[in-house]
Image (spheres, rainbow, N blue to C red):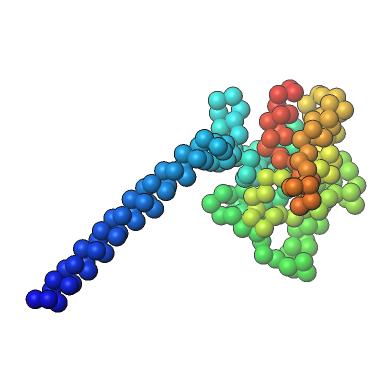
Amino acid sequence: MSTTRTTARTHWVAIRAMLLFTLVLGVAYTTVVTVIGQVALPAQANGSLERSGDEVVGSALIGQSFADASGEPLPEWFQPRPSAAGDGYDGGASSGSNQGPENADLIAAIEERKAQVAEFDGVDEADVPADALTASASGLDPHISPEYALQQVARVAGERGLPESEVRELVESRIQARDLGYLGEPTVNVLQLNLALSELG
């Protein structure tokens, strides 16, 4: 009889503990963190979404393609770095190619991209920056280097009938400095740059 009471008491203590921790950690904690996020950092808490008017067009954290239905890059837009995520820029299949620097397929892909980018932007192959040729580890990096963005200025300005100096100034205004002044490299967010570009005409 004593063993039965002890077992029942132990089960009841366990159930009460489970209910208490479910309320504290599963409900109260989640609610508090959600409220803090929505009040203090609403943009980040909601996925750093970017809008054009009332329409959500993407996230500042996820790279996307600026190409036509057949996958050809649109010359009136700044282009992102290549993507190895799924069929390209697939948020559900984030990954790199995992190919080493001496992999024959990677070397061939880089050479092919170098020729394509050089022709597309009207520059010498030797001047094409590395981030125009290689995908990031996630395949979804939303940033490119200032060098790659500036390389595209002449093409974008010509396609849009805008003064090259105006487009260059736009790019320079969108260069993000190193984090904390010393971490990483300066970058340009392609989606944010293209949204700003669309406002120029």
Whether residue 155 is visible here, answered yes or no, is no
Q: Nearer the viewer, residue 92 or 143?
A: 143
Q: Quadrant of residue 161?
A: top right
Q: Quadrant of residue 176?
A: top right
Q: Is residue 153 left or right of residue 80?
A: right
Q: Nearer the viewer, residue 184 or 2?
A: 2
Q: Is 184 situated above or below 190?
A: below
Image location of residue 48, percent across then percent down: 59, 39
Q: At 62% from the left edge and 45% from the top edge, which residue is drawn?
A: 62
Q: Is 109 situated above or below 38?
A: below
Q: Is residue 54 left or right of residue 195?
A: left
Q: At 79% from the left edge and 51% from the top edge, which residue is drawn?
A: 182
Q: Pick out the residue farthest to the left.
A: 1
In this figure, what is the number of numbered marks? 0
Q: Is 160 situated above or below 187?
A: above
The C terminus sits in image quarter? top right
Image location of residue 122, percent across then percent down: 87, 40
The N terminus sits in image quarter? bottom left
Q: Is 199 situated above or below 187?
A: above
Q: At 56% from the left edge and 32% from the top edge, which residue is drawn?
A: 56
Q: Is residue 198 left or right of residue 7?
A: right
Q: Quadrant of residue 196?
A: top right
Q: Pick out the residue farthest to the front.
A: 2
Q: At 71% from the left edge and 45% from the top edge, which residue is drawn?
A: 143
Image location of residue 75, percent across then percent down: 75, 35
Image location of residue 79, percent across then percent down: 73, 41
Whether residue 95 is visible here, answered yes or no, is yes
